[in-house]
Image: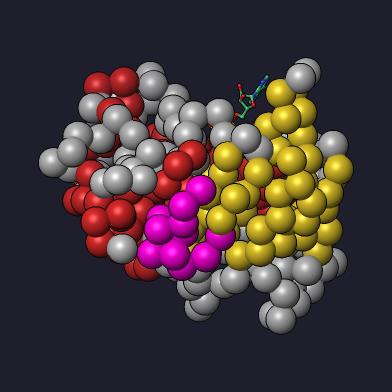
Amino acid sequence: MAHPHVPDPGSPVLSARGLTRSFGAVQAAADVSIDVQQGERLCLIGSNGAGKTTFVNMVTGYLKPTSGRIHLAGEDVTHRSPREITRRGVARSFQIPQLCLHMTVLENILTALHCSGAHAHFLRAARDAGSLARCHELLSSFGLAAHAQRPARELPGGVRKLLDIAIALTGHPRLLLLDEPTSGVSAQEKFGTMDTVVRAIETHQDRSPVTVVFVEHDMDIVRRYATRVAAFYNGRVIADGACDKVLGDADVRKYVTGSARSREGAQA
Ligand SMILES: Nc1ncnc2c1ncn2[C@@H]1O[C@H](COP(=O)(O)OP(=O)(O)OP(=O)(O)O)[C@@H](O)[C@H]1O
């Protein structure tokens, strides 16, 4: 059944206000507030353990914040389950791709289509020409058509990442969260991978642009693909704004990029 909330076009796609979350003595999120507008490509940066994945997990409902609120297009989803949040147009990929390794690439994506609610039954989805066509279109946009009949376990790491992101797009998300889309991808392939991802997202969006939040450690990728950057340190957002401004910020250079005397400093 469709949920009764009508998205408010004036509201941010995502609004997180005052999120906190602890694990024992570790404060993984300490008063995190971030708004994301439609069509933005927001990159979350921060050293290991800074709280980026915790933020993604709270937005997608996998973790409940101890305090604070999360709104999607104006609707309070703070206490919604991951499935309910998915139904509201939020999808994600993972640091470690969540694939059924014994299944083929095509079966993985058909299963995702089935789980996204577009089809009540896997076999029906598999027999439905429209579903198959959409799966093949997605595979082709991600350069995965030649792999369609291969078991996922045979795929190299970078290709698994692409399949995981293709799967996230099956449900026509409004908000896509990508956790380290280029981790495990070689330096030679990283720009090609991101170009493919960005192009595929643009190809498969409906009437309005998909909003993307991605976690990334590689500053070359951040500079090239982010329209905005939020820097995390010790569970807090210490800078949020335009890429140049955030990467040039003294605290970000000291605590996040460790580049106080390197490229940003030289260009400043
Ligand atoms: N389920 C959990 N149980 C206990 N501690 C956790 C859990 N999840 C995260 N933490 C801790 O919370 C802090 C933030 O972790 P988080 O995974 O959000 O960091 P991150 O910025 O995504 O790091 P990375 O770049 O290494 O993925 C870390 O100290 C981490 O050890």
Residue 248 included in the magenta stretch of the image: yes
Q: Residue at x 50, y 71 (%)?
A: 39
Whole-percent x and y of residue 90? 61, 53
Q: Ligand 1 is in which quadrant of the figure?
A: top right
Side of 18 where 57 appears, left or right: left
Residue 28 image offset from top left, x and y in percent: 68, 32
| Position above or below: 243 against 132 | below
Vertical comparison of 199 with 61: above or below: below
Q: Residue at x 13, y 41 (%)?
A: 188
Give the x, y percent position of residue 24. Answer: 78, 18
Compared with 205, 76 (above or below) is above
Front residue (pair 143, 146): 143
Name which quarter of the figure residue 30 lies in: top right
> In terms of secondary structure, what is the magenta stretch mainly?
helix
Does 242 sit left or right of 185 as displayed?
Answer: right
Residue at image location 25% in from the left, 22% down from the top: 154
Between 130 and 89, the one nearer to me in the picture: 89
How many discs mark residues in the rendered view?
A: 0
| Left or right position of 267 against 138 | left
Q: Is residue 152 magenta?
A: no
User: Which residues, given as a range, are shown in magenta?
Assistant: 240-251
Identified at 50% across, 78% down, the residue is: 207
Q: In this view of the protein, which residue sits in the foreground, 68 or 254?
A: 254
